[in-house]
Image: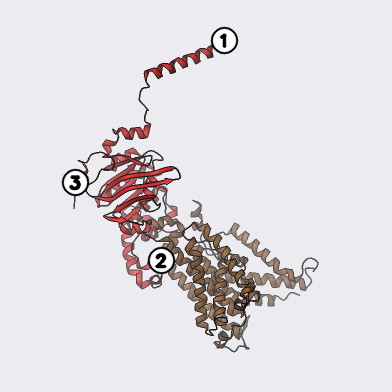
Amino acid sequence: MLDDATTDQPLATLPWEPGVSKPDPILVVDGMRRAFGGLVAVDVDHLEIQRGIITALIGPNGAGKTTFFNLLTGFDTPDRGSVTFDGDAIDNPSPHNLAKRGMVRTFQLTKALTKLSVMENMKLGAKNQRGERFFSALFTSMWSKQESGIEARADELLTRFKMDHMRDEYSGTLSGGQRKLLEMARSLMTEPRLVMLDEPMAGVNPALTQSLLEHVKGLRDEGITVMFVEHDMDVVRDISDWVVVMAEGRIIAEGPPESIGQNQAVIDAYLGVHHDAPLDPEEEEERLARAQQAEAQQEEEEE
Amino acid sequence: MIDWGFIFEQSLTQAIDFNAIAFVLAAMGINVHFGYAGLLNFGQIGFVAMGAYGFGLTLTFFGIPNVFVAVLVGIGFSVIFALLLGIPTLRLRSDYLAIVTIAAAEIVRLVARSTPLRPITGGAEGLNQFIGPFRDLNPFNASGTYGFGPWSYRGTQLFVIILGWILVALVVYLVWQLMRSPWGRVVKAIREDEDAARALGKNAYWYKLQALILGGVLGGLAGIILAVGNAAIQPDFFSAPQTFLFWLVLILGGVGRVWSPVVGAVLYWVIITFIRNLGRQLVSAGYVPTSVIDTSQIDQIQFWIVGLSLALLMVFRPQGIFGSREEMALDAR
């Protein structure tokens, strides 16, 4: 196993180009395409997500990040394309199958199960529960022992996320930030290998942002791979080890966070291609002449 | 003079009679569907009809004079009905199930009463020659009268009532046990947010199908109780408005609470019997002149009053008798 100091070392020597192959990818995407009518929302030729690090997925609004996320997690079906997760090809991805294999996601708009208590939310996340089968559910003795094990694990996680004082509250009474924390803690109950966070910081007050960031870093330190969508560049620079940039459905750049600010393709995608290029001299003169003419005309009319 | 003694006696008698039992079971089915799993079923009466006809046809058309087999066939009919409705619609948004159930329940009634099927289902007259094997099991004296206090029932009735309430006790226990188990947790999570449950590895479609079948079977049991209680199966009883009386019973008790259907159904039958008998007596004793209303119209009035009380309930206590206001308020956040 790699220790903390060396986890992002393998990527240091990689070229900063879209679709670059990684030494130990947990997730590999090939030729994935999703179109809504005439609009191609996602068109990704090749992407590899390195195991054990935090990968950020960024891009301007409408770049297809969330659609791409939905395709990877089985909430949407691609027109074509294939995904390999941890060495296994995923032929027929459905969200619950992927979750059972160890890929879990959170949502941009948090989905706290409002009329269940915080503890019930947590316990729901546990996998392979005997009591979730109809006929076993009828006999408490079939599942009570497993249940108390799950409860102990949930308590541990709640303590770690500093939510243990709320364990018996309805999750509908939590604030936006607390719901984000609960959703993250709940997803850890599935014992994931890859956690996909859709805008984990959206709508969270600044006081909680820092603690959320620490928890995301904590996941990496435990050896869990994290991929997240985010708009806030400070957050991306702070916690990510590798950044993937999408624009108009394609991956346009990849690299460590420091590289992204200098990348011409990224600047163009965010600010427009000709935002600071000088007009050619002829066009400039022509415009100037037109403006002067208009000004003169206006003065005449006023007289 | 108004005979108050008679009115109260009638109300209390109806409170625990087989009609109330059937309402408990049917409303419990909707409770499983809507209260716990969030499935909108507006065709519960269809499940009730499937149970009743499955039971009745076994004893008549299929010619198997065995009550136990008949009950199993009745349950089987409601399971098949649940599968027919659920497999195509449960992958879609919940509104689609609502539309399909209300239509499917009407289809069941119209098919059952259709003339071409008269040799099998008895057409519009229904079935009424099936009760023999059930009566044979009756340990009570069929022509005797049993009772204490204000309650008195003939032996045939008493048998249905006792079996019915034993069944209710089992069903209440079953639903209570399921809903406190991890299975119930998944079902409730799906009610709250299906995508969240799927993201956590739960096969939402399969759980919704199980819940639909369970609630449908409870509806089917209600149909069997009605069949043996009435000793007849009348297709036009299974009309769409009946479903909404089951809903009324559930909302009266409070959605998503295990005792709601029991208390709701008993209260419903007390209130409805009280109003009907009081109304009839007011007219026949001359307190209300027949130029205003006559006794045959009283049965219409009782549903006005039911509707009005439901409206008032929604305004002043939307969570029902057992529901929690705190929980309801969570939806509004």
The numbered dot on residue A303 is 1
- Chain whose colour in the figure is brown: B
Of tags 1 and 3, the one toward the viewer is 1
Mark 3 residue crowding within 10 angstroms, few (<14) / some (14–19) / many (20+): few
- Residue at label 3? A6
Q: Amino acid at mark 2?
A: Trp
Q: Amino acid at mark 3?
A: Thr
Q: Locate residue A132, reporting x and y percent.
A: 38, 66
Q: Chain of mark 3?
A: A
Identify the mark nearer the N-term, 1 or 3.
3
Marks 3 and 2 belong to one chain: no
Q: In the picture, which quadrant includes the N terminus of chain B?
A: bottom right
Provide the secondary structure element on which disc 2 rests.
Answer: helix
- Residue at label 2? B183
Q: Chain of mark 2?
A: B
Say whether residue B166 is visible.
no
In the image: residue A162, left or right of residue B175 = left
In the image: residue A289, left or right of residue A207 = right
The residue depicted at 32 percent of the width and 69 percent of the height is: A145
Q: Locate residue A69, reporting x and y percent.
A: 37, 48
The residue depicted at 40 percent of the width and 19 percent of the height is: A283
- Chain whose colour in the figure is red: A
